[in-house]
Image (cartoon, grey):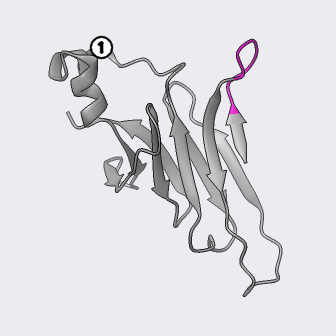
């Protein structure tokens, strides 16, 4: 599934790849909700996700670093090294998930559970 920014550019925002699960024949409902004001996405699924499911964020076109980030990361290169994908915990802290970079300005994580996932960098 590919989520895109609205026209006029329709740039890719996120890609969710769900692997086939031959061990389960029941229907599942999957909901993807962009997080307003943040570069993030809430993923909700009734039941588990098949092993091998991934979530990729593509942030080249529309990601804007918050002003506070510029204080800690004075250059875009430093910010790029610091940025990652985190899952928002119930206590409002972010737990970073091990990510890979399949291409420039892209981060991909294994998706194992429902939750709110955000692009963030440590303060």
Q: Which residues are magenta?
A: 4-10
Q: Is residue 3 above or below residue 52?
A: above
**Which residue is drawn at the image coordinates 78% and 69% (left, top)?**
28
Q: Give the farthest residue toward the front.
A: 103
Q: How many marks?
A: 1
Question: Main SS of the magenta segment?
Answer: loop
**Which residue is drawn at the image coordinates 56% and 58% (left, top)?**
54
Q: Which residue is mark 1?
A: 67
Q: Give the farthest residue toward the bottom.
A: 23
**Which residue is drawn at the image coordinates 67% and 62% (left, top)?**
18
Q: In the visual, does 16 lie left or right of 72? A: right
Q: Residue 46: image x %, image y %? A: 70, 68
Which residue occupies the foreground of this view, 111 or 113? 111
Q: Is residue 81 rendered magenta in the image?
A: no
**Which residue is drawn at the image coordinates 26% and 26% (left, top)?**
79
Q: In the visual, does 72 lie left or right of 29? A: left
Q: Residue 92: image x %, image y %? A: 36, 47
In which quadrant will I find the C terminus? top left
Q: Is residue 7 rendered magenta in the image?
A: yes
Q: Sort mark 1 into few (<14), some (14-19) or many (20+) by Cα contacts within 10 Å.
A: few
Q: Is residue 25 above or below residue 35?
A: below
Q: In the visual, does 2 lie left or right of 70? A: right
Which residue occupies the foreground of this view, 92 or 62? 62
Q: Residue 64: image x %, image y %? A: 43, 17
Q: In the visual, does 46 lie left or right of 55? A: right
Q: Residue 14: image x %, image y %? A: 60, 39
Residue 36 quadrant: top right
SS class of the residue under badge 1? Answer: helix
Which residue occupies the foreground of this view, 58 or 103? 103
């Amino acid at each position: 599934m590919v989520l895109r920014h609205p026209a006029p550019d329709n740039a890719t925002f996120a890609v969710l790849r769900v692997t086939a699960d031959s061990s389960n024949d029941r229907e599942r409902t999957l909901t993807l909700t962009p997080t307003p004001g943040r570069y993030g996405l809430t993923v909700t699924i009734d039941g588990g996700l098949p092993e091998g499911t991934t979530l990729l964020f593509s942030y080249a076109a529309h990601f804007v670093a918050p002003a506070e980030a510029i204080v800690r990361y004075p250059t875009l290169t430093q910010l790029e090294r610091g940025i990652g994908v985190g899952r928002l915990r119930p206590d409002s802290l972010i737990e970073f998930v091990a990510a890979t970079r399949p291409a420039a300005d892209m981060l991909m994580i294994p998706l194992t559970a429902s939750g709110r996932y955000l692009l963030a960098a440590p303060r």
